[in-house]
Image (cartoon, helix red, strand yellow):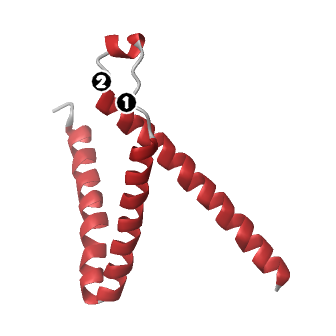
Amino acid sequence: MEDIGLYIAYAMFSAALLGAIVWPLINSLKQPKTLVKSGLGVAVLVVLFLISYALSGSEVTAKYAAQGINETSSQIVGAGLTLFYLIFALAILGIIYSEINKALK
C-alpha cells in the first residue's frame, strides 16, 4: 500500500508513452505522405549509423576487458559517439547555412 504513488506514476508514464507512440501513428495513417517523410528520416539515420559503425574501431584495453567489454560493444559505443559527432557537425553546418542564407536575403 505504501507504493501506490509509484504504481500511479508507472501507469501515467505508460499512458503517456503509449499516447506518444500510437497517436502520431494514427495521424500518419490518415496522411501517408508524412509517413514517407518520417521513414526517409529514419532511413537516413540508419545509413549514418552504418557509416559510423564502419568507421569506428573495436579496440579494447585491458581495463575495459576486465569490466566485460568486448570488441562488439566497443565498436557499437564508438559508432554511437561517431554518429553523435557527425550529427552535431551537420547541425552546426545547418545553423551556419541558415544564418548566412537569412543574412543574404
Image position, residue 54 (x, y; %): 40, 46
Image position, residue 83 (x, y; %): 48, 49
Q: Quadrant of residue 60?
A: top left
Tally the numbered discs: 2
Above or below, 58 against 94 in this view is above
Q: Residue at x 25, y 39 (%)?
A: 6
Q: Residue at x 20, y 30 (%)?
A: 2
Q: Do labels 1 and 2 touch, CB within 8 Å?
A: yes
Q: Which residue is mark 2?
A: 70
Q: In the shown orientation, is residue 34 left or right of residue 6? A: right
**Residue closest to the far left:** 1
Instruction: Say what amino acid the circle numbered 1 marks.
Output: Ser
Image position, residue 39 (x, y; %): 33, 73
Q: Which residue is mark 1?
A: 74
Which type of secondary structure does the marked residue at label 1 adopt? helix
Dot 1 alpha-carbon crowd within 10 angstroms: few under 14, some 14 to 19, many 20 or more: some
